[in-house]
Amino acid sequence: MTVALRVACARARGYARALRADAHRLLSALGLGRTELSVIMVDDPTIQGLNREFRATDSPTDVLSFSQIEEVGAPASNLHQLVDLPGTMLGDVVISIDTALRQASQYRVSPAERLRTLLVHGTLHLIGYDHERSRVEARRMFARERELIQAVSRRSTDRRKVGKAATRRSGKRTAR
């Protein structure tokens, strides 16, 4: 599994490690552990430029997705054909750290939780989910989003508990 994470603004650096770990756990939860995913953390002016260019909306947004599955001819709406093959590039998830931090404060969640939600949301778009298509699709996508957020969060919590238990036993913590 390859997660290429690029941090394009200083404000996002402190969140990179956790977001990369979340991306690995997300791909595993999706059964796509051998695929590749690109995650890019940018600022509002950068995502506004992308939003203007690709969606004709001249304002910042929280997350944009650029699927490479659709580009190679696989219909993204047929998720049964999405196979976990080494080297399969899902696409790019671009997250605005500025918007994510504002939303975290507004929704009263941690920045890590908000970034995780945006990562899951963007990745679901890469593999064919689209809440703008219809109400039925929106319900389907948001239900799957909630499931995946729980799965990724649970795995994150489990790893921290294991790390804390190992620290208590040995008195020190080792890198993994």
Image (spheres, rainbow, N blue to C red):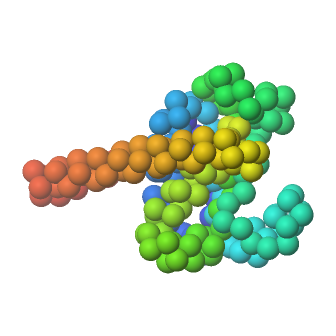
User: Along the horizontal axis of the image, is 47 left or right of 169?
Assistant: right
Q: Does residue 48 appear left or right of residue 168 in this picture?
A: right
In front of the other: 108 or 36: 108
Q: Nearer the viewer, residue 90 or 80?
A: 80
- Tell whether 148 sits left or right of 62: left
**The N terminus lies in which quarter of the figure?**
top right
Say how many tags the image has: 0
Residue found farthest to the front: 135
Residue lying at 12% horizontally and 55% vertically, measured from the top left:
168
Who's the residue at 71% across and 38% down the image? 128
Q: Is residue 38 visible?
A: no
Q: Is residue 160 visible?
A: yes
x then y, percent, for residue 79 = 67, 28
Residue 79 left/right relative to 172? right
Q: Nearer the viewer, residue 68 or 86?
A: 68
- Where does the image place residue 4, in percent across and percent down from the top left? 62, 49
Quadrant hosting residue 99: bottom right
- Name above or below for residue 112 compared with residue 3: below
- Residue 165 against residue 104 in the figure, above or below: above
